[in-house]
Image (cartoon, rainbow, N blue to C red):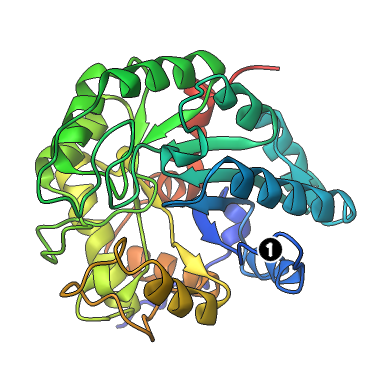
Amino acid sequence: MMVTQPPVNLKDWLVWDNHGCLPLRPFDTVFLPQLARYRQAGVDVAIVNIGFGDHGIEDHIRMIANFRHWLKQHPESYVLIATVDDIERARREGKLAIAFNMEGANGVADQPSLISLYYDLGVRWMLMAYNRANRVGSGCHEDEDRGLTAFGRIVLDEMARVGMVACCSHTGHRTTMDVMHYASRPVIFSHSNPRALHDHPRNIRDEAMRACAATGGVVGINGIGIFLGQNDNSTETFVRHVDYAVQLIGAEHVGLGLDYVFDAAELDDYLVSMASTFPEGFSYQAGMKMIEPERLSDIVEALVKRGYPEAAIGGILGGNFMRVARDVWRPA
C-alpha cells in the first residue's frame, strides 16, 4: 500500500533565502514590488544584494538608500532587520524580514571604518572577493590565488567586531582557506555548490566545505543552472546538491541561498558589460536558468521523500542561518 505524504506547509518552519538579486539601478523601483513573491512563496527572511564585483562605495550607498527608502514606505509588508528579534517579530506579523549583503569588498575600498556604517544600514554579510582579486584576497576566477592579504585580516577583524558575517562564495580556494583558518567567528558560503557534483570554478571543494562547518558556518546551496550542472535548474538536481552537502558536513551546516535574479535582462547585460568578471569558457551567457522562490515547496517535498526528518529540514530552510545570525550579529 502506497503511503501518501501530507502536503508541505512552509509555515511550520522559519524559511530564509540568504541571497537574492534585485536590479541595481538606484532610481528604479519597478521591480521592488516583486519582493512580495518571497512572502507568497513562504519565505520569512530574504537577504538582498546591494552591489557586487567592481561596484564601489557610491554604488553601494546609492542602492542601499534606494532599497531602504522604498521598504520604509511599505511597513505593512516589510521589516528592515536590525536584530534577530526583528525576524521573529516579522514572522509573527506576517511580514517579510529584509537585510542586505555585499558581494565582494570593493564597497569598503581602503576604508575599513565603512564596515560599521554598512552594518548600521542593514548589511549582514559580505563576500571577501567576487570572482576577481581585490584588496582583501583573490576571487575564484584568478589564475593565481595569492591568499588573504594583510588588509583582508583587518577587514575580517572589523567585520567580527561589528557583527557582520564573512562569506567566501565567489572567492578563490587559497583565500577561502586562509579566511577559514583566520576567522574568529562562523564563516559562510552564502550561495555556493559542491564542486564534486559539477566541476565549475565557482563551485567549492569538499575541503572548503568541511572548513566552513568547522567554523560553525553554513553552506547555502544556490539555484543557478550553470553551477548545478549544464544549465540545469531542475528541483531534482538542486536537491542532489543539498543532499551531497548534508552527507559531507551535516544538515546543521547547510542552508539555501537561491541567488535568484529578478531582472534576467539585467543579468544578461552584466555578462557583456563586465566580461572580465565572467570569463569565457564557463557558461556565462544569456539565458542562465535559475531556481525561483516559488519552488521552495517542491524542494521540501523532495527532501521529505528522501527521508529527511523535520528537524533537518527546519535547519536547512532557515534555522541554520538563524543560528549563525545569533552567533555573529551584534545584539541590540
- How many other residues sit within 10 Å of disc 1, few (<14), some (14-19) or many (≥20)? many
Give the labeled residue for mark 1: 39
**x, y percentage for residue 131?**
28, 52
Q: Residue at x 28, y 24 (%)?
A: 215
Q: Residue at x 60, y 46 (%)?
A: 60
Q: Quadrant of residue 274?
A: bottom left
Secondary structure at numbered mark 1 = helix
Q: Look at the picture and state if 137 lies above or below 45.
A: above
Check the image and name the residue furthest to the bottom.
Answer: 287
Question: Can residue 15 be seen?
Answer: no
Q: Quadrant of residue 3?
A: bottom left
Q: How many marks?
A: 1
**x, y percentage for residue 260?**
49, 67
In the picture provided, is 134 more to the left or to the right than 12? left
In the picture provided, is 180 more to the left or to the right than 76? left
Classify the position of the N terminus by image quarter. bottom left
**x, y percentage for residue 125?**
49, 37
Between 128 and 270, the residue placed more toward the observer is: 270
